[in-house]
Amino acid sequence: MRTRLLPLLIVLMAGVLLALGIPLGVITAGVEQQRVVVDRIDDAARFASLAQFVTARPATDTDSKTPEEDERLATLRTELARYYGLYGIRAGVFYRDHTPMAAAPAGMPVPRDGEGAQAFREALAGRRSHDPHQIWPWDDTGRIPVASPVIRDGDVVAVVMTDSPTGHLRAGVLRSWLLIAAGECAAMLVAVAAAFRLTGWVLRPVRVLDTASHDIATGRMNARVAATAGPPELRRLARSFNEMADHVEDVLEQQRAFVADASHQLRNPLSALLLRIELLALELPDGNAEIASVRTEGKRLARVLDDLLDLALAEHTAADLQLTDVAALAAERVDSWRPLADDKGVLLTYEGQRAVTGWADPVALSSALDAVVDNALKFTPEGRPVTVGVAAAGARVHVTVADRGPGLTDDELARIGDRFWRSGRHQNVSGSGLGLSITRALLTAGGATIAYAPHPPHGLKVTVTVPRTGP
């Protein structure tokens, strides 16, 4: 859940930061350019104030100007040249007919098209030129034209034009954007760290609930949740979960107690009944079929009661987990069952590693292997093999018992291990249908599992899995 929630939060926060950062970058670029434009307007106004004292040119004789006019014109030209040399900004004063009064560098033309021509026309009309289009850091061919009218006696007699390069402006905008990007990255890192903390705080009770649910599902009914962290809703859910787990544990405990008490209480009447049957058999002829049938059913009922008591004890008893040599234990159980296998003509063998350790309850694991091997020997025909193997696979140890019996269908495999369930094809084989249920209860208490699968071409393969890491 965290891997799904975190990307959502990060994308939302990134969207918010971008929604704030992009307009901020645009505004910053506009402010930088506006500062440059205002500065050029001030410069153009200063040159216009100098140019308005330069009287109009004589129509024919350019040498008829007074020395004062020559001095004013020289001052204007000097200022324009100094301005160009210092800032690299082209500037000129042009008459209405586009002829230059003074310009730096010499020969600077009046723009004939584009924003420069528009600014010149607006200045001729007595207005300050409009702001030029926005210059972006990647626009290395753009320039900033600014025009200001030279007014004398209420008439526009000339126009001051400045044509600025944009290198410094673009560099300034880029620096501002880099600062904004650095701030966005820092804010994003803070937001990601906050998202990790927030999701951890929100999902920690969920993870604890998931762990406790898994523990209860695998038989550890005493698992509970500490309802002290997380949002109020999840703390309330944790308290409700604990109450539910308490009720479930109470109900299961009552069921176990009932099964154990019923099994124990029925043993005495059943023993008395079997004794009366034996006394009755003494008064009947030997070989009476009805008496033999009653004896068989009585013994079967006694075996069922014993298995019910074992199942109740298996579900109630806590596992004594120890670091166990699973391979040695499996080989020992094979040796114990080999005389019975030889008597039935079944080839019982052990294959696999000789020393593999895992964490298990040795008594419970031995009982489980006994039940599985007993089942395999029951259903394996004479002359067929039953193989027990042990192998380590990562953090698990697998104990497999494979036989060559009739096997089970897919529907039967889905039901194997259910209490009192037996295949309709095997009703004539002795048993109560509780052996594998007891086995599963014993293994679950220690964190082990049992699985069933076909063993091609025919037969059943039972796999007991034991963890290699400690609890």
Image (cartoon, rainbow, N blue to C red):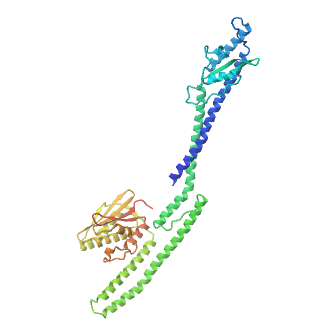
Q: Residue at x 31, y 91 (%)?
A: 281
Residue 460, visible in the rendered structure: yes
**Residue 345 placed where, x, y %?**
23, 72
Q: Is residue 90 above or below residue 131?
A: above
Task: Provide residue 63's location: percent of width, then percent of height.
Answer: 69, 5
Q: Residue at x 57, y 55 (%)?
A: 201
Residue 302 drawn above or below residue 240: below
- The residue located at (54%, 56%) in the rendering is 203
- Can you give x and y, in whole percent of width and height, for residue 387 in the image? 28, 65
Q: Is residue 295 left or right of residue 50?
A: left
Q: Residue at x 35, y 74 (%)?
A: 422
Q: Quadrant of residue 412?
A: bottom left
Nearer-the-camera pick, 446 or 454? 454
**Residue, far right:** 153
Horizontal relation, residue 389 to residue 145: left or right: left
User: Which image quarter: residue 53?
Assistant: top right
Instruction: Examine the rendering and report whether any part of residue 320 can be seen.
Output: no
Q: Is residue 471 left or right of residue 63?
A: left
Q: Residue furthest bottom?
A: 283
Q: Position of residue 293 (x, y in %)?
A: 32, 85
316 or 152, which is in the foreground?
152
Q: How many marks?
A: 0
Quarter of the rendering occupied by the C terminus: bottom left
Q: Is residue 222 left or right of residue 380?
A: right
